[in-house]
Amino acid sequence: MAGMLQILTYLLAFYLVIKGVEVLQIGLASNRQSRAGLVTFGALVLAACIVAAFAFCYMQDQQAISLSHGMGSP
């Protein structure tokens, strides 16, 4: 059961990163004169999405490790 939850977490983390890339692309595709703010915002959102994805995967892996250690003891 924990393995299925890990796979789901990895898929959602990938989706989160793709959405961050989408926000960055919206900023890059803007035809406003000063789009530097949009590009900066998009880059910050992408960085936050990548950090959040790694954090979610790390937390899920730690939970799976604790479950596997708990099952080994009587």
Image (cartoon, helix red, strand yellow):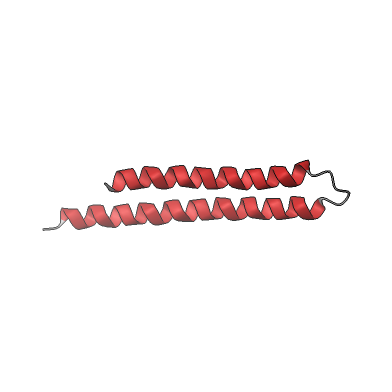
Q: Is residue 68 left or right of residue 13?
A: left
Q: Nearer the viewer, residue 43 or 32?
A: 32
| Image location (x, y in percent) of residue 39 | 75, 50
Q: As displayed, is residue 21 above or below residue 49?
A: above
Q: Is residue 32 left or right of residue 7?
A: right
Point out the residue furthest to the left here: 74
| Image location (x, y in percent) of residue 65 | 30, 53
Residue drawn at (42%, 54%) of the image: 58
Q: Is residue 22 left or right of residue 13?
A: right
| Image location (x, y in percent) of residue 72 | 17, 53
Q: Nearer the viewer, residue 57 or 35?
A: 35
Location of residue 10 by image quarter: top left
Residue drawn at (76%, 43%) of the image: 28
The image shows a total of numbered marks equal to 0
| Image location (x, y in percent) of residue 45 | 64, 54
Residue drawn at (34%, 47%) of the image: 5
Residue drawn at (31%, 52%) of the image: 64
Q: Nearer the viewer, residue 63 or 37?
A: 37
Quadrant containing the C terminus is bottom left
